Image: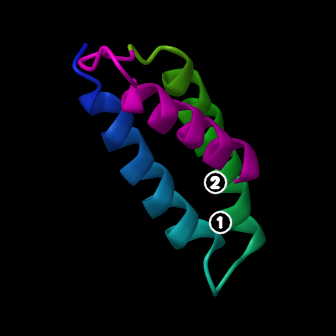
Amino acid sequence: GNGQEMYELREELGSQNWDNMGIFRTQEKLDLLAKNLEDIQARYEKICIPNPNEVMNTAFTDYVELGNLILLS
């Protein structure tokens, strides 16, 4: 893959967190976020990391950072 799905997933994670865990929280929204995080985690585990740079693979760094964001969510 070209790694595009990784950046789309990161955007989705940000939107889910903002919409469901933002300033105004309800138990219903937190439950919805928990369910959506399971799906996001499953999709994260299937991401293909491109390696366009022989010196430093920044896509791998982005992948690890996305994993950390999912864990913190």
Q: Is residue 9 above or below residue 49?
A: below
Q: Is residue 57 above or below residue 23?
A: above
Q: Which quarter of the figure has residue 9? A: top left
Q: Residues within 10 Å of mark 1 (few under 14, many from 20)?
A: some
Looking at the picture, how far across and down is residue 47, in whole percent? 43, 18
Which residue is label 2 attached to? 33
Q: Are marks 2 and 1 in contact (CB under 8 Å)?
A: yes
Where in the figure is residue 39, as x and y percent of width and height?
A: 56, 31
Give residue 52's mark: none
- Residue topped by disc 1: 29
In the picture, measured across the screen, residue 41 lies left or right of residue 4, that is right
Q: Split into 4 quadrants, where in the image is the C terminus?
A: bottom right
Give residue 66's position: percent from left, percent from top.
Answer: 54, 41
Q: Position of residue 34 (x, y in %)?
A: 70, 48
Q: Name which quarter of the figure residue 28 lies in.
A: bottom right
Q: Amino acid at mark 1?
A: Lys
The residue drawn where x is 61% and y is 78% is 22
* 5 w.r.t. 15: above or below: above
As rendered, which of 8 and 23 lies closer to the eye? 8
Q: Amino acid at mark 2?
A: Leu
- Image position of 23 with respect to 71: above or below: below
Local crowd at mark 2 within 10 Å, few (<14), some, or many (≥20)?
many
- Magenta region: which residues? 49-73
Residue 25 as seen in the image, left or right of residue 45: right
Colouring convention used in this rendered image of the protein: rainbow
Magenta stretch holds residue 50: yes
User: Tag 2's secondary structure?
Assistant: helix
Q: Is residue 65 magenta?
A: yes
Residue found 23% across the figure and 18% down from its top? 52
- Quadrant housing the N terminus: top left
Which structural element holds mark 1? Answer: helix
